[in-house]
Amino acid sequence: MSLSYRQPGVVLTDRRFTVPLDHADPGGETIELYAREVAASDKAGQDLPWLLYLQGGPGFGANRFVGRQAWLDRALQDHRVLLLDQRGTGSSTPATRQTLPLRGGPAAQADHLTRFRADSIVRDCEAIRPEVTGGAPWTVLGQSFGGFCTVSYLSLAPEGLSTAVITGGLPSLHAHADDVYRAAYPRIERKVTAHYARYPQDVERARRIADHLLTHDVVLPNGYRFTAEAFQSLGLMLGASDGSHRLHHLLADAFVRTPGGPELSDAFQEQAQNLLSYAQYPLYALVHETIYGQGARPTAWAAERVRAEFPQFDAAKALAGDAPVLFTGETVHPWMFDADPALRPLRETAELLAARTEWEPLYDPARLSANEVPVAAAIYHDDMYVDTTHSLETARTIRGLRTWVTDEFEHDGLRAGAPRVLDRLLALTRDEA
């Protein structure tokens, strides 16, 4: 039985669905999906069209909004919304260090996780759509990785879509993970350079912290091994609209004086571990590079390998001279599976996924070129997470897709610019803009 309850301005209903673990074996093992249905309080009884939200990631459950926050307020004006926890995330049969051993050893776990990519997510959506909408197609809103899933949806099951809206998530249809990161590191460097231009005092602060971590063995309160590379990975936040400011505040009071000399403060370490730990979303680290896997070529820790082509990101070399320490961005590295207690038991599983040479295609360029679903996409100029050139190439492939290219927002424009971003894109799908 579905349970409904209220928050300010909305009626919420918890929904649970049973779907095949492997959609190629519909009579085999099943998993549970969780989603939260949201309707405006004053329209709860109306027969409104459905909007399915696909969260960014991979590995994150859907937003837990309170009331009509962010873009949800705009969506509820003319839709009933389904916030889906994609398989393995949130409350949808989570995949973590605690649950994955139920599958067996690392080889069985890695094989299991090959079913947690965009193609399986799309087939999940199609499996639950008849129960949710009565069979009617729905609008899909895909943010970031949710946009990757939306392009897979247009490739695999466009008949399930009435409209598609994508924000910061038009992937390359062909690029290998190496190509993705080879394009990413220069963008990351530009974001770091812009941060230091905004907060020049942070150059010396970052150098001091990195030097301390290179010369001291620091273990955070949760057991995370805090290295210079881990510190650099805090640059992930620079892709968000307020990320530069949050990074600046984090660096401001990193050290305290103690009887034994300067040490990283408890407050700084607490904030750092909350930003670094994958305990809440281990699937992100496990399958992040698999979202670029297509064909027989392994991903093989692409972000780590390609980083070697950009020696300016080496903290020790920067400190040996007078160069600034560069932060990194949305990259997953093998050392994370040694540093993070939430990932350590999964190191061998991650290695097997990185070495895998059998990946099904995620996109169908021929079908996309014949697309008939109204599609609009926000492309954020110099997006740190998704390459603009790759996005524009894909936009030209998808027939009828309308783009809104803007430098007004960073990658989180759907949050920072809500509800205006969603309103603009919905208008584009109706050809009203």
Image (cartoon, grey):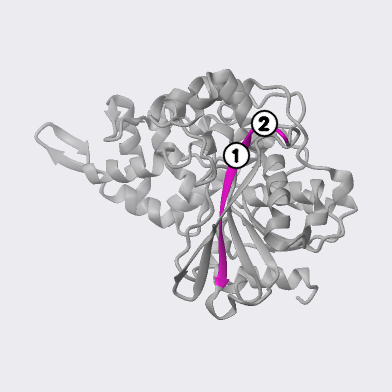
Q: Indicate the quadrant where residue 330 lies.
A: top right
Say whether marks 2 and 1 touch (CB < 8 Å). no
Q: Residue at x 36, y 52 (%)?
A: 248
The secondary structure type at the circle numbered 1 is: strand
Q: Residue at x 29, y 50 (%)?
A: 252
- Which of the image's four quarters has the N terminus? bottom right
Q: Is residue 300 magenta?
A: no
The secondary structure type at the circle numbered 2 is: helix
Where does the magenta region start and end? 27-39
Instruction: State the predominant SS element of the stretch in magenta.
Output: strand
Residue behind mark 2? 178
Q: Give how far apart the Cα atoms at labels 2 and 1 are.
A: 33 Å
Farthest residue in the left direction? 259
Residue behind mark 1? 31
Amino acid marked by disc 1: Ile
**Nearer to us: label 2 or label 1:** 1
Task: Return the x and y of residue 316 as percentages of the image width and height.
Answer: 41, 27
10 Å crowding of disc 1: few (<14), some (14-19), many (20+): some
Residue 425 visible in the current orientation = yes
Of residue 234 and residue 144, the one placed in the foreground of this image is 144
Q: Residue at x 57, y 46 (%)?
A: 57
Task: Return the x and y of residue 327 as percentages of the image width and height.
Answer: 46, 40
Q: Residue at x 57, y 71 (%)?
A: 39
In the figure, 314 relative to 406: above or below? above
